[in-house]
Amino acid sequence: MDSKISVVAIIVSDLNAVEKINSLLHAFGEYVIGRLGIPYKQKGVNVISVVMDAPQEIINNLSGKLGMLDGVKSKVLTAK
Protein backbone atom coordinates (compact mmCIF):
# COMPACT_ATOMS: atom_id res chain seq x y z
CA MET A 1 0.00 0.00 0.00
CA ASP A 2 1.13 3.53 -0.75
CA SER A 3 1.70 5.64 2.31
CA LYS A 4 0.62 9.26 2.42
CA ILE A 5 1.54 12.23 4.56
CA SER A 6 -1.50 13.48 6.43
CA VAL A 7 -2.43 15.73 9.30
CA VAL A 8 -5.19 14.58 11.61
CA ALA A 9 -6.79 17.58 13.30
CA ILE A 10 -8.52 16.78 16.58
CA ILE A 11 -10.65 19.12 18.68
CA VAL A 12 -11.46 17.86 22.16
CA SER A 13 -14.32 19.49 24.07
CA ASP A 14 -14.68 16.73 26.70
CA LEU A 15 -11.56 16.10 28.79
CA ASN A 16 -12.95 12.70 29.79
CA ALA A 17 -12.00 11.53 26.27
CA VAL A 18 -8.29 12.32 26.65
CA GLU A 19 -7.29 8.88 27.94
CA LYS A 20 -9.06 7.17 25.02
CA ILE A 21 -7.46 9.56 22.53
CA ASN A 22 -3.99 8.86 23.92
CA SER A 23 -4.67 5.12 23.79
CA LEU A 24 -5.67 5.33 20.12
CA LEU A 25 -2.67 7.48 19.22
CA HIS A 26 -0.41 4.97 20.97
CA ALA A 27 -2.00 2.10 19.03
CA PHE A 28 -1.26 3.90 15.74
CA GLY A 29 2.13 5.12 16.98
CA GLU A 30 4.19 3.37 14.30
CA TYR A 31 2.64 5.76 11.74
CA VAL A 32 2.90 8.97 13.78
CA ILE A 33 5.65 11.37 12.74
CA GLY A 34 4.80 14.05 15.30
CA ARG A 35 2.12 15.45 17.52
CA LEU A 36 1.28 18.89 18.89
CA GLY A 37 -1.35 19.56 21.55
CA ILE A 38 -2.58 23.02 22.48
CA PRO A 39 -4.97 23.67 25.36
CA TYR A 40 -7.25 26.63 24.63
CA LYS A 41 -8.69 27.34 28.07
CA GLN A 42 -10.62 30.46 27.02
CA LYS A 43 -12.79 28.30 24.76
CA GLY A 44 -12.67 25.15 26.89
CA VAL A 45 -11.15 22.94 24.20
CA ASN A 46 -7.88 21.23 23.36
CA VAL A 47 -6.57 21.17 19.81
CA ILE A 48 -4.28 18.33 18.71
CA SER A 49 -2.47 17.99 15.37
CA VAL A 50 -1.05 14.59 14.50
CA VAL A 51 1.21 14.21 11.45
CA MET A 52 1.18 10.70 10.00
CA ASP A 53 2.89 8.73 7.25
CA ALA A 54 0.54 5.82 6.58
CA PRO A 55 -1.73 4.18 4.04
CA GLN A 56 -4.98 6.11 3.58
CA GLU A 57 -6.96 3.23 5.10
CA ILE A 58 -4.98 3.47 8.36
CA ILE A 59 -5.38 7.25 8.55
CA ASN A 60 -9.13 7.00 7.94
CA ASN A 61 -9.38 4.23 10.53
CA LEU A 62 -7.77 6.40 13.22
CA SER A 63 -9.82 9.47 12.33
CA GLY A 64 -13.04 7.45 12.34
CA LYS A 65 -12.31 5.95 15.76
CA LEU A 66 -11.47 9.38 17.14
CA GLY A 67 -14.67 10.85 15.70
CA MET A 68 -16.78 8.21 17.46
CA LEU A 69 -15.62 9.41 20.89
CA ASP A 70 -17.97 11.74 22.74
CA GLY A 71 -16.68 15.31 22.79
CA VAL A 72 -14.14 14.71 20.00
CA LYS A 73 -14.13 15.94 16.39
CA SER A 74 -11.55 14.77 13.87
CA LYS A 75 -10.70 15.72 10.28
CA VAL A 76 -7.90 14.69 7.93
CA LEU A 77 -5.86 16.72 5.45
CA THR A 78 -3.76 14.61 3.08
CA ALA A 79 -0.89 15.75 0.84
CA LYS A 80 -1.07 14.86 -2.86
Image: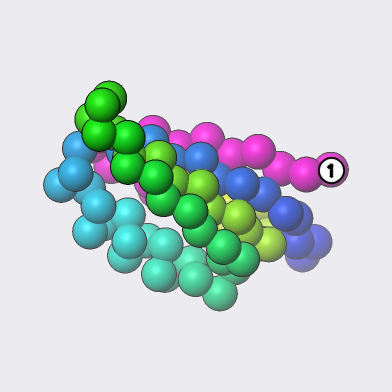
From this view, report whether residue 71 is shown above or below residue 1. above
The quarter of the picture where residue 77 lies is top right
Whole-percent x, y for residue 60 in the image: 56, 47
Q: In the image, residue 62 lies at what x, y percent?
A: 48, 53
Q: Residue at left 42%, top 62%? A: 25
The percent coordinates of residue 1 (x first, y second) are 77, 64
Q: Is residue 63 left or right of residue 68?
A: right
Q: Report whether residue 64 is seen.
A: no
Residue in the image at 62% along x and 58% along y: 52
Whole-percent x, y for residue 74 in the image: 45, 37
Q: Is residue 65 among what the camera can see?
A: yes
Task: Please give left or right for residue 28 compared with residue 11 in the image.
Answer: right
Quarter of the image with the C terminus in it: top right
Q: Dot 1 lies on which element?
A: loop
User: Neighbour class for label 1 at 10 Å: few (<14), some, many (≥20)?
Assistant: few
Q: Give, as a single range, the part of the protein colored magenta.
A: 65-80
The furthest residue to the bottom: 30
61 vs 22: above or below: above
Q: Is 53 included in the stretch rendered in magenta?
A: no
Q: Is the residue 29 above or below the residue 22 in the image?
A: below
Total marks in image: 1
Question: Is 9 rendered above or below residue 25?
Answer: above
Which residue is nearer to you in this view: 13 or 3? 13
Q: Residue at x 20, y 37 (%)?
A: 14
Q: Tell whether position 73 is magenta.
A: yes
- Give the labeled residue for mark 1: 80
Task: Name the residue furthest front.
Answer: 42
The amino acid sitting under disc 1 is: Lys
